[in-house]
């Protein structure tokens, strides 16, 4: 099968969509498919074609401030590449705002090609309303088979498209679970809990509320307060470091910046649990990698974490930050509960393998091929 992926953002940018599109394309290429990626993310090669691991990459970025992944003639450029490649299916990847990728849906529709659209983000009330209005005006939901990376992300998509939730396919993110397998058996925990988080330092990831929570725990628990290491980079990193200094919790919260995979795996092996307070998390790649490494996950309910976490069994998913904080205090007071969760997590790895992700995507492709444009 000849497959074209269209995404505003792609490597070398780093983010959930970028990493997932790259992984999916490489996994499909390994299956024997011919795979192309069309993106608005620029590199020094500008518009020169690239071949990476057998995947053909077409870059059509436009010189804009902050290298925004946009193109003023996106529809024309995408239509040209699609007509030249002649794919069997077009797979478009979108977030809440993805102007370039939405032009890809129009281009595929104009060429009469089967197209699926995967939503990688949680559409909030404003986005959901805008997409609903756009659907009323132009009927975009008839142009494509819709998919989302989790049940939580699928619900607002279905509402915006005025579809039953069952008509939005779930195409979950694939994870290299073997690469995150626990490095050694569960050990008895001594001393304060060691919490870890891996995230992009951006407002929607809610790193600052997590730092504030650690300060509150320090005031309540004193020397029994867990330590926390948050790895990652992003525009809010320096602000987060400043807040740690202001709160005087430098010995409790460590923000080392971005680390490589081996360092992160070693950190997971030395930690007690993973924690993240983001609410609009469509799936949670960092969380499932930590879960695959044998860590219980603590976070907020109502997001993509529920795809691979059973609250009370291999972590806690709570409706509020206060609920997460209460669970942390509970684990400090009841270390045997945490140990049981760690043992369960290590004996029962998540099911979200690339094999599962590829099978889900293939079903969506087959639906698109039989869908027909309306």
Image (cartoon, helix red, strand yellow):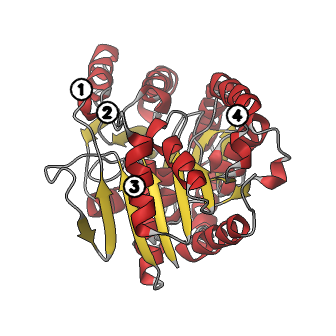
Residue 308 found in image quarter: bottom right
Residue 222: where, in percent of width, then height? Answer: 44, 26
* Element under disc 4: helix
Tell which circle, 4 or 2, labels the residue nearer the N-terminal end: 2
Q: Using the image, determine if residue 334 lies above or below residue 96.
A: below
Crowding around mark 2 (Cα neighbors within 10 Å: few <14, some 14 to 19, many 20+) is some
Q: Which mark is residue 68?
A: 2
Q: Residue at x 57, y 77 (%)?
A: 355
Q: Residue at x 74, y 69 (%)?
A: 370
Direction from residue 273 to residue 242 in the image, left or right: left
Q: Which mark is residue 65?
A: 1
Task: Give the Cα distance between marks 4 and 2.
Answer: 26 Å
Task: Give the Cα distance between marks 1 and 2.
Answer: 6 Å
Q: Using the image, determine if residue 132 lies above or below residue 196.
A: above
Q: Which residue is mark 3?
A: 80
Residue 69 found in image quarter: top left
Direction from residue 110 to residue 185 in the image, left or right: left
Point out the frontmost of discs 3 and 4.
Answer: 3
Point out the frontmost of discs 1 and 3.
Answer: 3
Residue 330: where, in percent of width, then height? Answer: 64, 39
Point out the frontmost of discs 4 and 2.
Answer: 4
Q: Which residue is mark 4?
A: 138
Q: Using the image, determine if residue 33 lies above or below residue 208.
A: below
Q: Residue at x 47, y 64 (%)?
A: 4
Task: Give the Cα distance between marks 4 and 1.
Answer: 31 Å
Tell which circle, 3 or 4, labels the residue nearer the N-terminal end: 3
* Element under disc 1: helix
Task: Give the Cα distance between marks 2 and 3.
Answer: 21 Å
């Amino acid at each position: 099968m000849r497959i074209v992926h269209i995404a505003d953002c792609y490597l070398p940018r780093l983010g959930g969509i970028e990493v997932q599109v790259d992984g999916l394309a490489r996994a499909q290429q390994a299956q024997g498919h011919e795979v192309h990626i069309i993106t608005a993310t620029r590199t020094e090669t500008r518009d020169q074609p690239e071949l990476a691991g057998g995947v053909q990459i077409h870059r059509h970025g436009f010189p804009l401030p902050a290298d925004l992944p946009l193109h003023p003639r996106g529809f024309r450029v995408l239509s040209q590449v699609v007509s030249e490649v002649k794919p069997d299916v077009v797979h478009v990847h979108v977030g809440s705002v993805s102007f370039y990728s939405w032009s890809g849906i129009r281009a595929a529709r104009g060429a009469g090609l089967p197209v699926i659209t995967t939503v990688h983000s949680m559409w909030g009330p404003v986005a959901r309303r805008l997409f609903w209005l756009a659907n009323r005006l132009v009927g975009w939901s008839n142009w494509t088979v819709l998919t989302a990376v989790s049940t939580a992300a699928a619900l607002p998509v279905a509402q915006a498209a005025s579809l039953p939730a069952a008509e939005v396919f779930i195409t979950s993110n694939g994870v290299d679970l073997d690469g995150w397998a626990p490095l050694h058996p569960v050990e008895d925990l001594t001393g304060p809990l060691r919490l870890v988080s891996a995230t992009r330092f951006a407002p929607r990831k809610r790193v600052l509320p997590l730092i504030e929570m650690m300060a509150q725990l320090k005031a309540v628990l004193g020397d029994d307060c867990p330590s926390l290491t948050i790895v990652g980079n992003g525009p809010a990193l320096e602000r987060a470091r400043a807040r740690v200094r202001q709160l005087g919790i430098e010995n409790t919260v460590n923000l080392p910046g971005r680390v490589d995979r081996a360092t992160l795996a070693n950190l997971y092996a030395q930690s007690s649990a993973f924690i993240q307070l983001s609410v609009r998390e469509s799936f949670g790649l960092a969380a499932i990698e930590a879960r695959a490494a044998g860590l219980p996950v603590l976070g907020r309910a109502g997001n993509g974490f529920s795809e691979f976490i059973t609250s009370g069994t291999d972590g806690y998913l709570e409706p509020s930050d206060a609920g997460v904080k209460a669970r942390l205090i509970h684990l400090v007071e009841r270390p045997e509960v945490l140990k049981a969760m760690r043992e369960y997590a290590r004996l029962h790895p998540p099911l979200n393998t690339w094999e599962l992700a590829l099978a889900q995507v293939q079903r969506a492709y087959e639906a698109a091929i039989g869908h027909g444009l309306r």
